Image: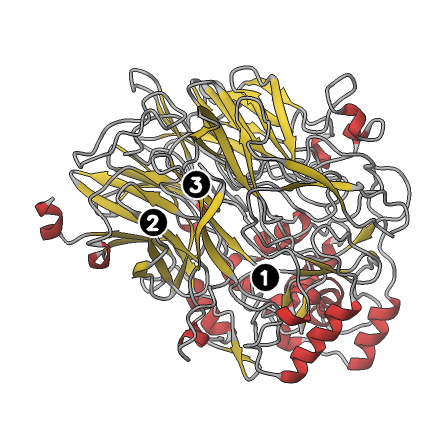
Amino acid sequence: MRISLRKAVGATAGLGVMVAASLVCGHRVPKVQAAGPGAGASYTTWKEYGGAADDSQYSALTQINKANAGQLQQVWFYRTGNNGYRYGSNPIVIDGVMYVVGKNNSVAAVDAATGKEIWVHDVGRARSVMHRGLMYWESKDRSDRRVIFMADNMLRAVDARTGKDITTFGENGAVDMRTGLGRPVESVRSIGNSTPGRIFDDLLIMGSTTGEEYDSPPGDIRAYNVVTGKLVWQFHTVPHPGEFGYDTWPKDAWKYEGGTNNWGEMSLDEKHGIVYIPLGSPTYDFYGAERHGKNLFADCILALDARTGKYLWHFQDVHHDLWDYDLEVGPKLLTIKHDGKDVDILAEPGKDGFLYVLDRMTGKPIWPIEERPVPKSDVPGEESWPTQPFPTHVPPFVRQSFTAKDIDPYITDPKEREEIKKTIEGARNEGIFTPPSLGTTIQIPGNNGGANWGSGAVDPVTKTVYVVAKDAPALLHLAERQARGGGRGFGGPPETQGMLIYAQNCTLCHQASLKGQPPAIPSLVGVVDRRGADMVRALIHDGRAPMPAFPNLSTTDLDNLIAYLKAPEKSTISTEMLSRFMNAGPPAAPAPRLGPAGTRYFTGYGYMNSEEGLPAISPPWSTLTAYDMTSGTIKWQVPLGTIDVLAAKGITNTGGFWPRGGPVVTASGLVIASVVSDSKVHIYDKDTGKELATLDTPGADPQGIPAVYEVAGREYIAVSAERHMPVVTQGGAQVGDTTRATARRMFQDDPNTTQGYYVFALPVRTTAKK
């Protein structure tokens, strides 16, 4: 069984978008105004990440429907190429122009009807951009129109018509998000964000990706003036002295504790001026001896006054998180009839597999949620919280136990199935909320299971919430990190010394072969050629969620490691030398510590996959679930997607791997969703879960949230997709695996690359009949 125990993969960062709603389409549109949280929201445009300020992932357009979805065809493709792992982007469309993350991490504007490029804004040598989407704002007279995004640590604005920098925003066109966090700026390695923020009036409300290591900075929620870039308000997610929640942490925890950040989406109730913010876990994710207490506002749905940042209410779904059970999905806002009254609610799916349904004006549960005793930690110094909240009425959407009877029957090697059985039976395994231990612990749902960013959509008319989720247990094992320095002293060329560094720091996740564990952990074959030595060096030193940083590696260590990654065949090292180094390498200098002195334990994410790439748990591995919010019950649940190798054998009811992003639901009766494993967009009947059609993205896997929009009377569906990374192996060799030269070609900026934006519409003759 292939199990990654280093913390180098999971899910990352981000959030929402802007404010707007205009009537563009001439199609038949059901009245939605009374049901939506905004005043007169039409849901006929896609001007914001997730479709609207409330992050509904809903479209009221009806030209594409149940009867004709099978006639959809690809009408254009915008090639991005050479972006590496972008993890999915949700395009936005304004006045027939689509704004996207383009090639080489650029920001681009294209004609939304043809894909013709209008302008490209080059972000230079930025290592990362807000790759899940962009933000748009315009003044009331439309004289000022802006596209706003993050590049590395900087919040930037460009003219939406020309793509040129707006230098009056911030300082010379940028706001440094590392400032104002109560930490020296030089100590904050990265504070970017992968997901857009929300714009309310002239305020840009932002979360951040803080990193998930010890001493990471806090994830304060901040609002900036969208014109000047000046800070307007700031909410401390790790409370300062005198602030509500301060007593749920040790004294002065705000000086050294981090995380508790909004790296997923947020939702905006424009009518009431309330922003709903799901927050992630505190650092360190799996060991909390430095943060005894409930740890507000980690793992909370937080309601703030959007104009002032004033605290309104919170609901914490995990106390003193030891499982990395971040809340990430933008809360789904709707109005239901409950106990004979209209009640404004929100529904929030979690990584723990629960759907939390709350009164969005008060934060009180719509149906009972009770505190239940959970297993106690046995790790020295840890004080796990004795109870956790359990919804008693709304059923979970993924499994919350993993025993020997749940082992995947499609793993072909019976010896490996027996090995998995022994692993499960030998681990601490008491179901959900079993705390990590110094032995091994089964975590179910795993830290990358349940609902992740983008995973929810809501139909405000039928009062239905749709959740895309994955069943993915993990195997956790806390241990002290035995950090060591480089391979100097063993002689040999830089490639050999680099191999020693790689063996110690990288193999548990990326494998000795450099092939990784796609799609969760990328292959490093040819990574220097396709990304460039400077970017690889920066990624290793600074980290990029979910990969941790390695700041203790010296410049020489990094040079040697990059030499090895560029030419691993030049390494000359014996098994004896490798063993000697791994067991007795010279210790590296310790990193500066902000928290209390004491042992710090670490674990990997612990993905449980077989040698051939199949999950250790039986299918379904990805599901689409429909919840009736008037009753709090499941209407239907179906597997989402397929696995290429199994589908070729006629096995199609397994669900696919690793959905990254989520669904869109339409007024015409469709749910549109995808997974990473089969190069298809799947379209389902929203009332029954029956699959109606699939859309091919040959050679690429759809990721992110689809965008549904209309231009000149024609409706379109746009999805971003990355090059296809086969996830199942046959006979120990990865299906579709490539040589380094082929890998380089796949990432070159050539006309044959399959990575980019795929856009579908009905044939023109079909459109004309509407």
Q: Give x and y (percent) for residue 325.
A: 65, 46
Q: Give x and y (percent) for residue 27.
A: 17, 37
Choose between 67 and 138: the one closer to the eye: 67
> Spatial distance from mark 1 to mark 2, Cα to Cα?
35 Å
Q: Give x and y (percent) for residue 146.
A: 38, 27
Quarter of the figure that contains the C terminus: top left
Front position among marks 2 and 3: 2
Q: Residue at x 16, y 34 (%)?
A: 26
Front position among marks 1 and 2: 2
The residue under label 2 is: 687
Classify residue 420 by image quadrant.
Answer: bottom right
- Residue 454 appears anywhere in the view: no
The residue under label 3 is: 133
The amino acid beneath tag 1 is Ile
Choose between 159 and 646: the one closer to the eye: 646
Which element carries disc 1, helix, strand or loop? Answer: loop
Neighbour class for label 3 at 10 Å: few (<14), some, many (≥20)? many
The residue under label 1 is: 521
> Spatial distance from mark 1 to mark 3, Cα to Cα?
22 Å
**Above/below status of 743 relative to 553:** below
Whichever of labels 1 and 2 marks the residue nearer the N terminus, that label is 1
In the rendered structure, the answer to whether residue 564 lies left or right of residue 683 reads: right
**Above/below status of 154 relative to 4:** above
Q: Residue at x 27, y 26 (%)?
A: 22
Q: Residue at x 55, y 46 (%)?
A: 127
**Above/below status of 563 relative to 27:** below
- Residue 70 appears anywhere in the view: yes
